[in-house]
Amino acid sequence: MEEASKNRVRTRADSRCEYCKVYQDCYPDFTFHIEHIIARQHGGDSSPDNLALSCHLCNAKKGPNLAGLDPDTGELKPLFHPRKESWSGRFAMQEDGVLYGLTSIGRTTVCVLGMNSIMRVAIRHELRQLGRWS
Ligand SMILES: [Zn+2]
């Protein structure tokens, strides 16, 4: 993938993970990944509509997954698609930094991507305290 394409994805995402919404500068030792929303092994291409900026933690948990089990219902649900869905329509954050799903897709994505690990919750809480969460 060309560097210009990667830079367009980073700019479009405002240098935030498009899943957990943490900023790249919160993890200075890691470079966020340009992630294929539909993994190449499932036929996904490298067009802009199939690319998202993902932190190393979300990317590692998501891998090639396209779906997961809703923790409330046990039903198989697709994961959040950053190009086709609104983040604020699927997720919300408590004041303490914990994310929760507003829908089945949101709950499933929070669970599969491990979005509420202790460190990630602490970072989001700090972003809120600093007025950087929007
Ligand atoms: Zn993330």
Image (cartoon, rainbow, N blue to C red):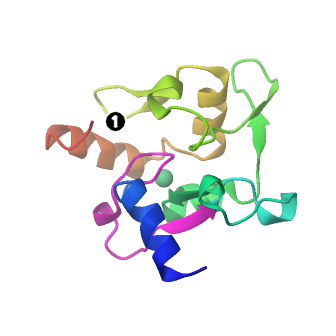
Farthest residue, direction right: 42
Would residue 62 appear left or right of 54 to someone viewing this image?
right
Q: What residue is shown at x 46% (from left), y 45% (from top)?
A: 20
Indicate the position of residue 65 as horizontal and vertical percent values.
76, 51
Q: Is residue 22 rendered to the left or right of residue 86?
A: left
Residue 109: quarter of image: top right
Give the number of callouts: 1
| Span of residues in magenta | 17-35
Judging depth in this view, the residue of 2 and 39 nearest the camera is 2
The residue pinned by badge 1 equals 97
Question: Measured from the top left, where is residue 72 in percent x and y?
Answer: 69, 19
Image point (31%, 49%), residue name:
123
Q: In the picture, which quadrant includes the C terminus? A: top left
31 drawn magenta:
yes
Residue 39 point in image, percent of width and height:
76, 60
Q: Residue at x 85, y 57 (%)?
A: 42
Residue 53 appears left or right of 64: left
- Quick one: SS at disc 1? loop
Decide if ligand 1 comes within 8 Å of the CB at mark 1: no
- Left or right: residue 131 versus residue 62 is left
Amino acid type at circle 1 is Gly
Q: Quadrant of the N terminus?
A: bottom right
Instruction: Measuring from the top left, give residue 119's x and y in whole percent.
Output: 39, 52
Question: 105 or 4, which is in the foreground?
Answer: 4
Q: Is residue 58 magenta?
A: no
Residue density around tag 1, few if under 14, some if 14–19, many if 20 or more, within 10 Å: many
